[in-house]
Image (cartoon, grey):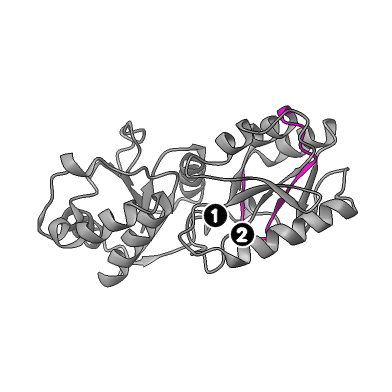
């Protein structure tokens, strides 16, 4: 039995489909905004403030492992109804929320660990979503791109585990843009057309690789083309690559390189 903490984005649905295809026993705690899994008979809608109910459900299902998939947005804390364990644990979640969404998930993971519940990697059942080292397009990075990649690696090695920056746009070794809390799409929208840089999405230093892995999909490549970027760089086995076949086809058609380091 696996417990699924599912939020928004297509990734959560992809994980669920794979679990069903593997015929694994599961249950869902639906943290999406609009209760997107309500038609699944194994889905439960429980407020983040009711940790007692969440933990009781996990133990009732005799479940010792859970995973997180999809975006779990910051709740409206003022309207939350708390049970006893919610009252006990909520201060740590509120403190984490001031840092960002990833910090909220990390705080929940700590709570689950305290209750002897193990959190496994979000791609444990979907290893095919993460690419290995190599170049996956006809185009390849040039010497200037390699300098930019080196610059980005140095930047990410200095970031803290709860820093919200997971993406940079770099050109000729100079950082043109940094991802904010709003995400990669908003960062790219602030670029000038024909920016000619490269998008680099790498995990942060000491990042919890069970959750919040750098993610790209077809929309990312559409935006890359729109703002005239040359390519995208990800970390081997530490990424989530959605719409893989479509992305590679799109990249080759538009002379965009896909480099996994």
Query: Quick one: 235 or 145, which is closer to the camera?
Result: 145
For image coordinates 24% across by 49% down, the residue present is: 48
Which quadrant of the view contains residue 105? bottom left
- The quarter of the rendered structure image containing the N terminus is bottom left
Q: Say if residue 3 shows up in the picture.
A: no
- Magenta-drawn segment: 226-241
Task: Report which residue position mark 1 lands on.
Answer: 213
Q: Could you give the CA–CA distance between mark 1 and mark 2, rounded to whole angstroms?
A: 6 Å
- Residue 122 in magenta? no
- Residue 228 in magenta? yes
Q: Are marks 1 and 2 in contact (CB under 8 Å)?
A: yes
For image coordinates 51% across by 37% down, the residue present is: 10
N-terminal label among 1 and 2:
1
Rendered view: 167 above or below 256: below
Q: Say if residue 207 shows up in the picture.
A: yes
Say which element carries label 1: loop
Query: Quick one: 8 or 174, which is closer to the camera?
Result: 174
Query: Quick one: 19 or 45, which is closer to the camera?
Result: 45
For image coordinates 35% across by 38% down, the residue present is: 32
List x then y, in percent, for residue 202: 63, 56
Task: Report which residue position mark 2 lands on.
Answer: 238
Say which element carries label 2: loop
Q: Is residue 137 left or right of residue 103?
A: right
For image coordinates 56% across by 67% down, the residue present is: 205
- Label 2 CA crowd tier, 10 Å (few <14, some 14–19, many 20+): many
Query: Quick one: 44 or 26, which is closer to the camera?
Result: 44
- The quarter of the rendered structure image containing the C terminus is bottom right
List x then y, in percent, for residue 85: 15, 60
Rendered view: 18 above or below 112: above
List x then y, in percent, for residue 30: 32, 42
């Amino acid at each position: 039995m696996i417990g699924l903490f599912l939020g928004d984005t297509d990734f959560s649905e992809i994980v669920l489909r794979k679990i069903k295809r593997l015929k694994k026993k599961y249950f869902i705690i639906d943290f999406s905004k609009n209760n997107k899994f309500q038609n699944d008979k194994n889905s439960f809608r429980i407020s983040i403030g009711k940790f007692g109910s969440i933990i009781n459900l996990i133990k009732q299902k005799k479940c010792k492992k859970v995973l997180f998939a999809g975006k779990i947005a910051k709740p409206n804390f003022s309207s939350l109804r708390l049970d006893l364990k919610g009252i006990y644990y909520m201060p740590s979640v509120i403190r984490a929320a001031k840092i960002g969404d990833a910090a909220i998930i990390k705080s929940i993971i700590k709570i689950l660990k305290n209750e002897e519940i193990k959190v496994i990697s979000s791609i444990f059942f979907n290893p095919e979503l993460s690419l290995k080292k190599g170049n996956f397009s006809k185009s390849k990075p040039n010497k200037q791109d390699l300098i930019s990649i080196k610059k980005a690696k140095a930047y990410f090695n200095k970031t803290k585990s709860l820093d919200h920056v997971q993406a940079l746009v770099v050109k000729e070794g100079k950082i043109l843009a940094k991802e904010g809390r709003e995400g990669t799409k908003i960062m790219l929208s602030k670029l000038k057309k024909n920016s000619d840089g490269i998008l680099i999405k790498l995990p942060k230093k000491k990042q919890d690789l069970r959750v919040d892995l750098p993610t790209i999909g077809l929309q990312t490549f559409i935006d890359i083309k729109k703002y005239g970027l040359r390519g995208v760089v990800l970390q081997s086995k530490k990424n989530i690559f959605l719409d893989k076949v479509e992305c590679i086809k799109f990249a080759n058609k538009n002379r965009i390189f896909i480099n996994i380091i």
